[in-house]
Image (cartoon, rainbow, N blue to C red):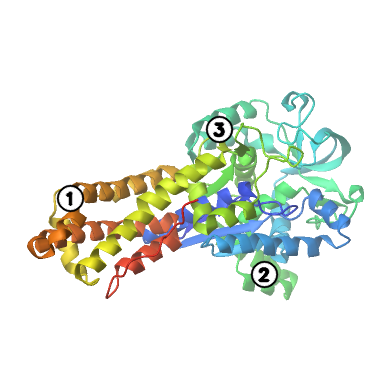
Amino acid sequence: MTYYITTSRPYTNATPHLGTILDPVYADVYARFNRLLGQQVFFLMGTDEHSSKIADEAIKQWISPQEFVNTKYQEFKQVFDLLELSSDNFMQSSDAKHKWLANLAWEKLSAKNLIYKKQYQGLYCKGCEDFYSASQLVDGRCPTHPNLEIQNVEEENYFFKLTAFHDSILDYLRRVRVNDPSIINSLKNFCADLQDISISRDVSRQKTQWGVVVDSDPQHSMYVWFEALLTYLSPLVPDELYETWIDSTPDIQKAVELEAWQIISENTPQNLQVIGTDNSKFHLVILPAILFGLDIEPIESIIIHGMINDAGGRKFAKSLGNGVSFDELYNKLGAEGVRFFVLFYCNSIGDTNYDEAKLLEMYNSNLGNKLGNLVMRLTTLISNFNDGDLDIEAAKDAYEDNQVLRLETETIYRELQSLRPEYGLRAWFDEVSKINKYLEDTKPWTLMKDKQANSKEITKILHIAIFGLLTLVEPLSLFLPATSELVDNYLRCDKIVKATPLFERL
């Protein structure tokens, strides 16, 4: 069965920032890891495009919301392509097939009496696209968007019977596999006062029509987060099946709809989801309930990472001017440096404070010194020793026979299996340090002062060190694929030449 990985969907109301690259980079590591294990992988990414914030931004620019999100979609895609993310599908939530599937889900839930209509009054945060109780506010403000005014909204909406799944949600929280158990405890507390949730807005209250309209009641559009959660299902349906539905009679359409749900059922549960802590309620409480209502098993494992703050621990905010854009980091570190930032510097549990001085110190120490200098040293030594000739099979035998340099790649893989990606890359650099120590202890550069007398010993040392580094190329490809390919090309060739610096000192 295909291993299914996906990420939360970034809003396309602004340009990509550091927070938006955490999900996809973490997920990419696990997509590559599972392919390495021989699994067929479906790695899904996409954009969340129907929020009122997006419509407002489009209005400001005098363009349609669709034009606006299409442009933003390309911006996000360009960033993710720069990071060499190996996704199989990068979808838009404004896609026609998704709107169709969202309405099929609405119909199915309605048929089970899980959706109903009522008058509602609540405290609404436009930044979150979510309602809050008074007790959840901090000084009368949204805890995530303290600079936005809370809106007191009163209207007739459709509601989803979240309370019908109270026990099922608690059972799911007991069995779902997460990297941060503290999140589970907070969500159990949230479930103690579980309420049914509003899942639609009256289109007459919107400045411009933008969203997934409810086919059975066009006066309402689905709440953005409700239909956005269904973007994990719609890409599983083949485009050809949806196209067949469009051109068919009602009887054929019903058969197509049944086939669509069968395909979705066969390709779920989703194996791994990557989200931020601000999305935990949606993915660990609301989404499982929706899936239960659709007779679909919920996600098996979830990585829940924290937020990126400034060096003082304050949330990045436009009003504070303390944010760091993707372009700023990319221009300084390059694509592999940005991946290193996510996978080595950042914490997968809890928040991360962005301290540029600390980041550059880690960058120089690990990428520049431990890895970059090692590659330059080894390629220089062998090119000076015997004009770059290397017998890979002899190097392999020497490494396997030696009892001094023993590298443990299994530690790297165990950390990934434990949903701790940053510990996996840190473990990789620990192994690289062993090769550096081996060279410092054996000092082949000193032995090369008399090549003829020490030829056998020098050959043995270089064979062991070079093949040791080659054993680390494969696990490195999960984290830093371009760097892994460079190292492999330098060492696995007919004639080794002195490498150029992999990473310039910053």
Secondary structure beneath label 2: helix
Front-most of residues 125 and 272: 125
Q: Is residue 105 above or below residue 292?
A: below
The residue carrying mark 1 is 442
Estimate the x, y position of residue 20 in percent, counting from the top left.
62, 50
Quarter-wise, where is residue 288 in the image?
Answer: top right
- Disc 1 residue crowd, few under 14, some 14–19, many 20+, Cα 10 Å: few
In the image, residue 380 lies at what x, y percent?
29, 63
Q: Could you tell which of marks 2 and 1 lies nearer the N-terminus?
A: 2
| Residue sitting at x 61%, y 31% | 312
Q: Earlier in the sequence, mark 3 or mark 2?
A: 3
Residue 497 is situated, as x and y percent measured from the top left of the image, at 31, 70
The amino acid at mark 1 is Thr
**Disc on res. 183:** 3
Callout 2, which amino acid? Tyr
Instruction: Count numbered badges in the picture.
Output: 3
* Mark drawn on residue 279: none
Does 80 sit left or right of 14 as displayed?
Answer: left
Q: Give the residue pinned by disc 2.
A: 242
